[in-house]
Image (cartoon, rainbow, N blue to C red):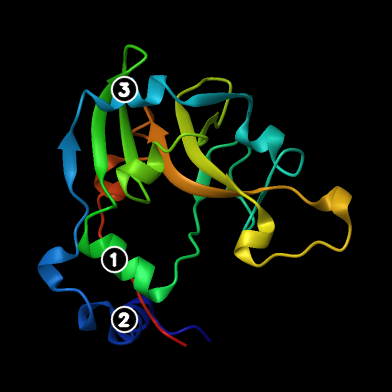
Amino acid sequence: MKPPKIQYDEYKLSKNEITKYVDSDQLNIPYITDLEIASYLDKMTFAVNTFKADHEERYDTEYGNDMDEQGYIIGIELNLNHERFIELIKNEAFKLIKTVWRNNQYHLITFDHLENVFKQGNIIYKLTDQEDAFVIVQLVEPEKLGYQYSDSKDRHPIALFKALISARDDIYPPEYLCKEEFFLQRD
């Protein structure tokens, strides 16, 4: 039987080691407005297909894609080692940025430093044909991440999530995106 939620949360929090490495006042996701971000987005490569359509055709992911039936991502998993995770938090790499792009208001949540989000070669994928939500991914050769394929026809670059862009506050509310629920547990 699963313990009541409050007990689980208290247990989970008691196992969180993040405050051993990061001051509690650094555990935040800044929410800023930056209208210049749109110029960086305009310079990036834009995929023709949706993220879902190109999955397993042009790229793989480290983990399964948590998507709803329309193609909106409902869960993103990042593979970060202990030191990298702490460095990203301490240096506020995770940011929520409000901007205007394509004559619409968007929120961009970053999962890396801005220079890595807007790195040349990264790709913007639309999540649906409505073009109201996107992901920025970096395609990395699988061997660089320690993956080996026994059959070369199954080999594709690995898509690493760098950011999520959304005009859909109903699906990706800014209040939710700003929640600083950082959790670290070393095994």
| Residue drawn at 43 percent across, 85 percent down | 3
- Which disc, if any, is residue 87? 1
Relative to 165, is 90 on the left or the right? Answer: left
Disc 3 versus disc 2: nearer the observer:
3
Instruction: First in sequence, mark 3 or 1: give its number.
Output: 3
The location of residue 151, given as percent across then percent down, is 89, 57
Instruction: First in sequence, mark 3 or 2: give its number.
Output: 2
Few, some or many residues within 10 Å of mark 1 (<14, 14–19, 20+): few
The location of residue 61, given as percent across then percent down, is 63, 52
Q: Nearer the viewer, residue 78 or 82?
A: 82
Relative to 172, is 181 on the left or the right? Answer: left
Relative to 93, is 55 on the left or the right? Answer: right
Whether residue 171 appears in this view of the structure is no
What element does badge 2 sit on? loop
Position of 43 relative to 76 (above/below): above
Relative to 165, is 144 on the left or the right? Answer: right
Which of the 4 image quarters holds residue 98?
A: top left
Few, some or many residues within 10 Å of mark 3 (<14, 14–19, 20+): some
**Residue that extends furthest to the left in the rendered view of this protein:** 25
Amino acid bearing label 1? Glu
Which of the 4 image quarters holds residue 16?
A: bottom left
The location of residue 76, given as percent across then percent down, is 49, 53
Kindly report the distance in space between the C-alpha atoms of the residues bearing marks 2 and 1: 17 Å
- Which disc, if any, is residue 16? 2
What element does badge 1 sit on? helix
**Residue that extends furthest to the top in the rendered view of this protein:** 103
| Residue drawn at 69 percent across, 44 percent down | 59
Q: Nearer the viewer, residue 146 or 19?
A: 146
The location of residue 70, given as percent across then percent down, is 60, 33
- Which disc, if any, is residue 38? 3
| Residue drawn at 31 percent across, 78 percent down | 6
